[in-house]
Image (tube, grey):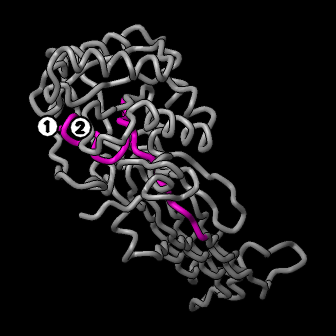
């Protein structure tokens, strides 16, 4: 299924049923009086976070969702049946925005979270409601009110603990496949990954974290170049970024340090909060170099960046260094204060 991370839909709540104008008519009962019942309420529309979904692709076809109208009232003081509510299931991590007002309605980050997005109409009043000591035979009723209608923009932001950041062909897809059971497309040309891939990395029997492989970014991504503007937002959900660097690029003119600086600049342009997120340097494809050349290139990279953070050397293709990286990430999350986890959610 093609990954879709944005969609626009229309939700329409049900209308309330009209009140009934009726009088009691029975043999031997004179002046039975009013007995018109109220109309039923219209159904409301709810969005529900569902972990069985991971894309908004279904909303490319189904764009309008309408709840059931309430039924009108009837004689003998019978209230009309209320319309049933409509649950629309969306992926966990969906942000809902009102297109007309720009208001952020909700952020569905928890499985099963349910949010009303369109209120059903109220049922009208039957003529029984207007009976009084001075008006024994009222002929007044009220119609049901219209249900709320809204145009909504759905935006999916992938929920993951770790996000992989890097230039095209840096080896991110290979790395996530080596560390988890994810099976992303891997090939020897740029932009192989066209949508985020998620994988669960297990460290021991009881420890695990979710890793997201974000499509390759290029310089100018924050302004819309390449695929970046579509997928930079997915990194906002993560708590740790792994900046994957190809230490042995096929094009010898490519400077790994300049590539890292370019993407760091894109993060700053897109979001200051994202730029301030913890970021580790992961030097990939170390199996292609001998020890001496690897040491030289590593030193040049660290010096060129003036890097003082965590640095890991891995070979995603052979699995070298991936176990140490996974254990370090698990230790990092163990030391992270619990209140920070809750705040991020």
List the single residue furthest toward the right: 134
Q: Is residue 264 above or below residue 251?
A: above
Residue depicted at x 42% and y 62%: 88
Q: Which residue is mark 2?
A: 199
Q: Quadrant of residue 172?
A: top left
The one nearer the camera, 190 or 142, is 190
Q: Is residue 220 placed above or below 208 in the rendered structure?
A: below
Q: Nearer the viewer, residue 277 or 227?
A: 227
Q: Are marks 1 and 2 in contact (CB under 8 Å)?
A: yes
Residue shown at the point (57%, 91%) measured from the top left:
27
How many angstroms separate mark 1 from mark 2 (CA)?
Answer: 6 Å
Badge 1 element: loop
Query: What range of the chain is rendered magenta?
Result: 151-177
The residue drawn where x is 59% and y is 79% is 17
The picture places residue 156, in percent across and down from the top left corner, at 45, 52
According to the image, label 1 marks what residue?
181
Of label 1 and label 2, which has the lower sequence position? Answer: 1
């Amino acid at each position: 299924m093609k990954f879709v991370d944005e969609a626009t839909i229309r939700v329409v709540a049900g209308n309330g049923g009209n009140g009934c104008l009726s009088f009691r008519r029975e043999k031997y009962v004179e002046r039975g009086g009013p007995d018109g019942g109220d109309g039923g309420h219209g159904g409301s529309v709810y969005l529900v976070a569902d972990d069985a979904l991971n894309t908004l692709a279904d909303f490319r076809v189904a764009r309008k969702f309408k709840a059931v109208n309430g039924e009108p009232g009837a004689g003998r003081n019978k209230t009309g049946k209320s319309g049933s509510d409509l649950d629309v299931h969306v992926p966990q991590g969906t942000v809902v925005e009102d297109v007309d007002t720009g208001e952020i309605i909700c952020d569905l980050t928890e499985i099963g979270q349910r949010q009303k997005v369109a209120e059903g109409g109220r049922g009208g009043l039957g003529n029984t409601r207007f009976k009084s000591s001075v008006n024994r035979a009222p002929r007044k009723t009220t119609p049901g009110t219209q249900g709320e209608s809204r145009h909504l923009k759905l935006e999916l932001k992938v929920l993951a603990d770790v996000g992989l950041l890097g230039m095209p062909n840096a080896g991110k897809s290979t790395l996530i496949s080596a560390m988890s059971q994810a099976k992303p497309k891997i090939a020897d040309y740029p932009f192989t990954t066209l949508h985020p891939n998620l994988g669960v990395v297990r460290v021991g029997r009881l420890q695990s974290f979710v890793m997201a492989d974000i499509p390759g970014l290029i310089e100018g991504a924050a302004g819309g170049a390449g695929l970046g503007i579509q997928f930079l937002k997915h990194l906002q959900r993560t708590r740790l970024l792994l900046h994957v660097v190809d230490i042995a690029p096929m094009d010898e003119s490519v400077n790994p340090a300049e590539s890292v600086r370019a993407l760091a600049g894109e993060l700053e342009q897109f979001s200051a909060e994202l730029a301030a997120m913890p970021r580790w340097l992961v030097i990939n494809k170390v199996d292609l170099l001998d020890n001496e050349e690897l040491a030289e290139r590593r030193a040049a990279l660290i010096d060129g960046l003036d890097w003082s953070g965590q640095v890991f050397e891995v070979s995603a293709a052979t699995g070298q260094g991936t176990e140490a990286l996974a254990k370090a990430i698990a230790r990092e999350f163990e030391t992270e204060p619990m209140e920070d986890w809750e705040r991020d959610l």
